Amino acid sequence: MPKISARGLRMPESPIRKLVPFAENAKKRGTEVIHLNIGQPDIKTPEIALKAIRNFEPNIVAYSHSAGAQSYREGLAKYYQKVGIAVDHTNILVTTGGSEAILIALNSIMDEGDEIIIPEPFYANYNGFLTSAGITVKPITSVIESGFALPSISEFEKLISPSTKAILICNPGNPTGYLYTQEELNSLKEIVLKHDLFLIADEVYREFIYDGEKHISILEMEELDQNTILIDSVSKRYSMCGARVGCIVSKNRELIDTGLKFAQARLSPPTLGQVACEAALNTPDTYFTEVVEEYMNRRNVLIEGLNKIDGIICPKPTGAFYCIAQLPVDDTDKFAQWLLEEFSWNNKTVMVAPAQGFYSTPDLGKQQIRIAYVLNTADLKNAIRVIDEALKIYPGKQA
Amino acid sequence: MPKISARGLRMPESPIRKLVPFAENAKKRGTEVIHLNIGQPDIKTPEIALKAIRNFEPNIVAYSHSAGAQSYREGLAKYYQKVGIAVDHTNILVTTGGSEAILIALNSIMDEGDEIIIPEPFYANYNGFLTSAGITVKPITSVIESGFALPSISEFEKLISPSTKAILICNPGNPTGYLYTQEELNSLKEIVLKHDLFLIADEVYREFIYDGEKHISILEMEELDQNTILIDSVSKRYSMCGARVGCIVSKNRELIDTGLKFAQARLSPPTLGQVACEAALNTPDTYFTEVVEEYMNRRNVLIEGLNKIDGIICPKPTGAFYCIAQLPVDDTDKFAQWLLEEFSWNNKTVMVAPAQGFYSTPDLGKQQIRIAYVLNTADLKNAIRVIDEALKIYPGKQA
């Protein structure tokens, strides 16, 4: 029998995959499982995008240009100009979701054995793209005590080797919800210019910023045109995860030209998704105002509720719709499984994502969980109560 | 300025990319360019699929399962059973087009430096996936004189090394239109069993078989369950190239489980495309009867017309909608450019794909072109006349 590849064997599993059968069993027993683990928002897709799908007129679902439909790229360029990013359609490569944007960007600038520095905890799926591309992660640990702020320049410099090609950030962050400050971005600028690195920023949560804070894109920064690669996606912006449309934006022409060669090999990003996206560019501002207000309410309910529980530490995020909470337990892998297998309160339990999968350094995050606050506040309140009650009796509780 | 990766530099350009500006210039001069170079069919998408898009009801365009919507996979399994392939939905991984199916299959079974044997000429975009995955192609040349039949077992065995992991075929073939016989498939079976290799077959043109011939899938073959990986796509079957929906089908559980890890990293194949595909499964048989008849007419017009021209050799393909023609010219790269830059007949010219890009062995295919017969017969007749007239005056004509 022929063998699977070494890279196939190395590919990581999703951090929550092993919990799925336990959740299914809990549901079979009649227990309601409140999902705090997922990133699929319950927010509606803008009506204008749904209408565009329902009004699809062509009688052939044809390929688009490999870089994406030009009309969509032109519309996207206007969107970026509006948020302060001075690009035109030739700086944009439309991709199959943010996922493919990351994969093409990594393949365009890194070879097998090259190293990338990523502040951890980071989005677990980066590991999949990095593994399949043969790239080594050098994690730099940000800590819950400082709310996951960027580590200092000197910590970065300790990790830089001749194989280092890039730094990857997610801003605002999944799973931390952390929003980088101008000062932190300036530090990154200093490092990448000094060491001639690419700076990749995953900014897919750009619209979800709270408390009047302002998001700063790496493409707004001066002197960084050749170094910066923006990763974007409509999945969360318009609650259109299934459209599978994202993009790479860069002022570095060589990067865009190289990325296009990878894009040509796979011919075209999804045409139907692009139709929805092009229409979604005209989503009224009120949509975002309402969505941001809704998420901010959810965040407030969640963070206040969690921090009231004895022994839980949960910094208040200013962006995205995730937070990391530290729990007074032995191991959140065990706790998450116990919640599904052994516990219920009022016939409810919760499914959480143990945070170890978001760390690259072994054994970090063992007391942490990631929560996606993509549920209504009533569900969130129930979830908090479940966690509170669970911690009262969990056998692996720690002081 | 940070550097592009070595793999980015190695990524091949599309064989026709450098012709595009010449085609644009010809159009600017007012010359009609008949495109024989493209694989985008002019056939309409089945009405039932278009209706499903227009009737899209959910108010969130959400992720599907990473392996594809279960209802779609179940429907697909029935489709495969109908064409003689005994699989269920757990043998299927829905992908973003046939492109991603190939990429995931290659990554699941091959590591950087591994070797794959592919009969040439082959679909040029395979080179992109192989380059990005760091895999080495060992081409085995099939020749126009035998109509691109499979080379003998002994030729294959000359290429097998300890690094050989797989043989990849396209059946029926792009760019040759060649349909493998039972005998040829039996030869492949013998080789892969003897040397413990995977056999990957790209069967995306399964429905396009002419002259009463029958397509045989590698998944129909006995004793090969652990060795065979089927690559499929709806792009050509339902003329839905832009849906970006394909799949991997295999009875090898380890392969499907490994592929799923790559699929989970990118979360979900396109949801809207899958909605169209699930509906398209109920396309009436008359749709295919009509489409196959149309392509067979086009093929007949094209092949007869070309073979009437002095010095052209063009074997009659029995599948897909491509053919390779050998022309009495010095170099089809030059000829293709000359057609666009210098020539017109009756204010028309043609754009063809020089065949060198479909060969991996240097200098092969220099006198060949690939033609996609995805145009109506009137256009094809004009294209044949253009080529005939052009060859009368082309400066690089050879006997």
Image (spheres, coloured by chain):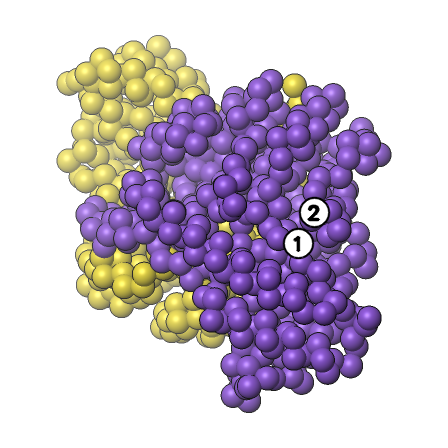
Chain colours: A purple, B yellow
Of all residues, the one furthest to the bottom in this rendering is A29
Question: For residue B138, what is the image quadrant?
Answer: top right
Circle 2 crowding by C-alpha within 10 Å: few under 14, some 14–19, many from 20: many
Q: Which mark is residue A148?
A: 2
The quarter of the image holding the C terminus of chain A is bottom right
* Label 2: element kind: loop
Measured from the top left, where is residue B375 in percent x and y? 23, 39
Provide the residue designation for mark 1: A315
| Chain at tag 2 | A
Q: Nearer the viewer, residue A279 or B399?
A: A279
Residue at coordinates 26% horizontally, 57% vertically from top-left?
B53
Q: Nearer the viewer, residue B203 or B88?
A: B88
Q: Are marks 1 and 2 on the same chain?
A: yes
In the rendered image of this protein, does residue A53 appear above or below residue B334?
Answer: below
The quarter of the image holding the N terminus of chain A is bottom right
Q: Earlier in the sequence, mark 1 or mark 2?
A: 2
Residue at coordinates 77% horizontally, 31% vertically from top-left?
A153
Which amino acid type is shown beneath numbered disc 1? Pro
